[in-house]
Amino acid sequence: MSAPTSVAVAAAAPLSVAEARQRIASAVAGHGPKACEVVDLMAALGRVLAEEVLAPQDVPPHDNSAMDGFAFAGQALVAGQATRLRVVGRALAGHPFAGSVAPGDCVRIMTGAMMPAGTDTVVPFERCEQQDDVVFIAPETVRAGDNRRRRGEDLAVGAVALPAGRRLRPADLGLAASLGLSRLSVRRRLVVALFSSGDELRSPGEALAPGCLYDSNRFMLAATLTQLGCEVLDLGRVPDDPQALDAVLRQAIERADAVVTSGGVSVGDADHTRAVLARHGAVDFWSVAMRPGRPFAFGRLERPDRAPCWFFALPGNPVAALVSFQVLAREALLALAGAEGDAVPPLAARCAEPIRKRPGRAEFARVRLSLGPDGHAQAQAWGGQSSAALSALVGAHGLAMLQPQQGDVGIGDWMDVLPFEGLC
């Protein structure tokens, strides 16, 4: 396909993190693929639900026991008096008691078993005494209606069980199964093209020449995209050559919904990515006032016959690449995939040791979480804070989000922490 007219990129001051996030969110809103497909429940984990799921029946479908015990009519209970009941049968989950239970009688019942007709209360085994076929309940042990789960208590027939746009998690699949559903309609996966840029990069398993290093970003970002439910189009590593970059970018534009790159967006002599991207569309911005992750480019790649392909050009340093992805790209890609309400709220934690910071930009310190002596979460800076030190990320639990106006953070000060485990 022919490239659109080149778009000049003028110098501009770095955006704040908040403004960058807002501009990205506004740009991608309403875009993304609309096609959907029906998949088996076992293959639906992490997919985005295309249509809301309505409960086809009450859940639970009948009154059932919440405890192992004896089911009886609560009207037999009299304040201040012991209750005597006669055992007339038993009910098991999947094997209900046949017939109804007369006043003064009871049925031995297991958790989850259907409540027999004529009963509305369950007394646990451990809270009563049994002698042969007679059960004795001490005064004020239970109240009428105790330990009964009502029909439709969880979901009434016709209620929205799962909203459209939800990224499906294990509990969602369990709920769908409880409704008797074996297949779900989901949005097609977002296709994200991924490549790394740099002459110095080598693939794991290759010999390293002097001055070279292994391409860790592509493997790290591919795993992150996979966890988000995206289909990753791995375009490999690309040398610092404008023609090579242009060729791989054309592939990405043709085959993907979005492009994620790492390397080549700073101001170095060999950083061509930004200029090549601009030839195919519009670079919205390319610098954010954050540490790590300042060189970050975002924009759209035009396709005359289709919706635009969005690009997220990350810095080359590994920590900076992952931090800028999580802070700036993650929610946008989920929005393009059709996911709604998937933003991860930060965790409030106290600072366990001083963290030095200069006001003026947002900083994201790698921290390890623990439980403080006051019972609150506390965060301690973990490992070196270099934007190239991946080993610190491995031991860290999340990112302390230090605001631009903040200075040094003292022991006991509150911080917002974005946990890594909550991002997927």
Image (cartoon, rainbow, N blue to C red):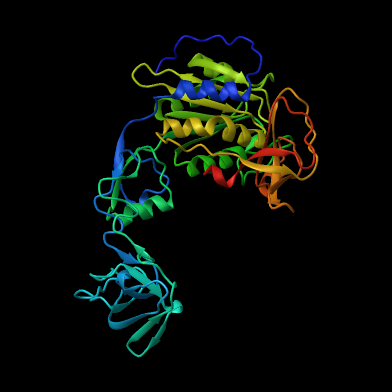
Q: Is residue 396 visible?
A: yes
| Residue 239 coordinates in the image, percent (x, y) | 60, 28
Left or right: 424 in relation to 160: right
Above or below for 278 versus 397:
above
Instruction: Residue lying at the far front in this picture: please name it.
Output: 80
The one of 75 and 166 positioned closer to us in this rendering: 75
Q: Nearer the viewer, residue 57 or 218?
A: 57
Rendered view: 16 above or below 36: above
Q: Which quarter of the figure has residue 80?
A: bottom left
Q: Quadrant of residue 75?
A: bottom left
Outermost left residue: 99
Q: Is residue 314 left or right of residue 387?
A: left
Name the image quarter holding the N terminus: top left
In the rendered image, which quarter is residue 306 located in? Answer: top left
246 to 86, vertically: above or below: above
Residue 6 locus on image (x, y percent): 50, 10
Q: Percent x, y for residue 230?
A: 44, 39
| Residue drawn at (54%, 31%) of the image | 329
